[in-house]
Amino acid sequence: MTSLFERLGGEDGIVKISNDIVENHNVNPLIKARFESSDHDKLKKMVSDFFITGSGGPACYEGEGMLAVHKGMNISDNEYMAAVDDVMKALDSNGIGDQEKSEVLYIFYQLRPEVVAV
């Protein structure tokens, strides 16, 4: 069986998906304010590296863990779900199949305790 990394299109596919995720966040009325002062190019790179590493690709993510990054932000369930919806939209717009979307969704549900209300 091929890795999720490969099924998401490898590095090129994941970079495109990650760019779309950040762009979706930037226009999502529920969460866009959280990203207004962000360096969007840096954020796109961090999201790409996180996705590449987390999906079975080469270990390239050098950022902090999810808990450390989100600690003190007091992210709500609604905000988290809005972000997950943005991820699903990006996967849809890049033609990613249902199996892969299910696997990505599972990963994001596993990360929830490290992001919401911490």
Image (cartoon, helix red, strand yellow):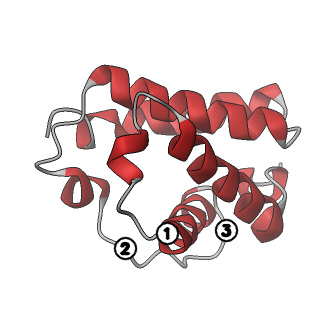
Q: Quadrant of residue 48?
A: bottom right
Query: In the image, is residue 12 above or below residue 116?
Result: below
The residue at 61%/41% (across/down) is: 24
- Dot 2, how many residues are within 10 Å of its Cα: few (below 14), some (14-19), or many (20+)? few
Report crowding for label 1: few under 14, some 14 to 19, many 20 or more residues within 10 A (C-alpha): some
Q: Say which residue appears at 33% left-offset and 34% top-offset.
A: 112
The earlier-in-sequence mark between 3 and 1 is 1
Q: Are marks 3 and 1 in contact (CB under 8 Å)?
A: no
Placement of 97 over or under 68, stated as above or below: above
Residue 114 picture quarter: top left
The mark nearer the N terminus, 2 or 1, is 1
Q: What residue is pinned by disc 3?
A: 57
Q: What element carries label 1?
A: helix
Give the left or right position of residue 12, taking residue 25 as reference. Answer: right
Q: Seen in the image, is 93 located left or right of residue 106? A: right
CB contact under 8 Å: marks 2 and 1:
yes
Of mark 3 and mark 2, the one earlier in the sequence is 3
Left or right placement of residue 75 versus residue 101 in this view: left
Quadrant where the C terminus sits is top left
Q: Provide the residue designation for mark 1.
A: 46
Instruction: Give the number of the mark in front: 3 or 1.
Output: 1
Left/right of residue 27 with respect to residue 63 in the rendered view: right
